[in-house]
Image (tube, rainbow, N blue to C red):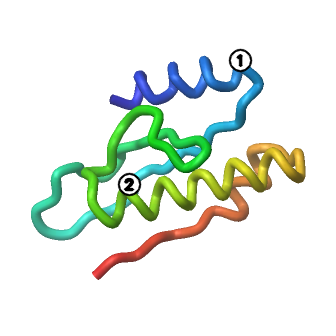
């Protein structure tokens, strides 16, 4: 799954777009995806990958889109984007 996400990120970037990447870093209990799952989003849409669907994925798509918009607007580098990474916690 990760390779598909990275390939799509390259394709999107080559078109001059800035996608947002979301990575599932931890889970508890039974989950459809495990830590390390990724998705790529742009303009509020999932492009490829999954975090398992539902509210967590919807929030991740929203945050990845916002991070990509922030990166485009301010023309900051990857280091700055990672420094501003937000963590979405669910119960």
Question: Nearer the viewer's eye, disc 1 or disc 2?
Answer: 1
Q: In the visual, does 24 lie left or right of 67?
A: left
Q: Position of residue 85 (x, y in %)?
A: 63, 62
79 lies above or below 84 = above
The earlier-in-sequence mark between 1 and 2 is 1
- At numbered mark 1, what does the secondary structure look like: helix, strand or loop? helix
Q: Quadrant of residue 29?
A: bottom left
Question: Mark 2 sits on what residue?
Answer: 24
Query: What quarter of the picture does the C terminus occupy?
Result: bottom left
Q: What residue lies at 52% left-to-right and 23% top-to-bottom?
A: 8
Label 1 – label 2 distance at C-alpha: 25 Å
| Residue count near mark 1 (Cα–Cα under 10 Å), binned few <14, some 14–19, many ≥20 | few
| Residue count near mark 2 (Cα–Cα under 10 Å), binned few <14, some 14–19, many ≥20 | many
Q: What residue lies at 46% left-to-right and 58% top-to-bottom?
A: 60
Q: Quadrant of residue 54?
A: bottom left
Q: How many marks?
A: 2
Q: Position of residue 34 (x, y in %)?
A: 24, 51
- At numbered mark 2, what does the secondary structure look like: helix, strand or loop? loop
Residue sitting at the far left = 30
Q: In the visual, does 19 lie left or right of 40?
A: right
Q: In the visual, does 3 lie left or right of 79?
A: left
Q: In the visual, does 40 lie left or right of 15?
A: left
Query: What quarter of the picture does the N terminus occupy?
Result: top left
Query: Which label number is shown at residue 84?
Result: none
Question: Mark 1 sits on what residue?
Answer: 14
């Amino acid at each position: 799954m990760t390779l598909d996400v990275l390939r799509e990120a390259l394709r999107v970037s080559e078109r001059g777009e800035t996608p947002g990447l979301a990575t599932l870093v931890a889970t508890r209990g039974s989950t459809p995806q495990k830590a390390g799952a990724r998705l790529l989003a742009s303009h509020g849409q999932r492009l490829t990958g999954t975090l398992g669907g539902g509210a967590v994925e919807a929030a991740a798509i929203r945050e990845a889109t916002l991070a990509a918009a922030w990166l485009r607007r301010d023309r900051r580098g990857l280091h700055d984007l990672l420094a501003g990474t937000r963590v979405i916690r669910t119960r």
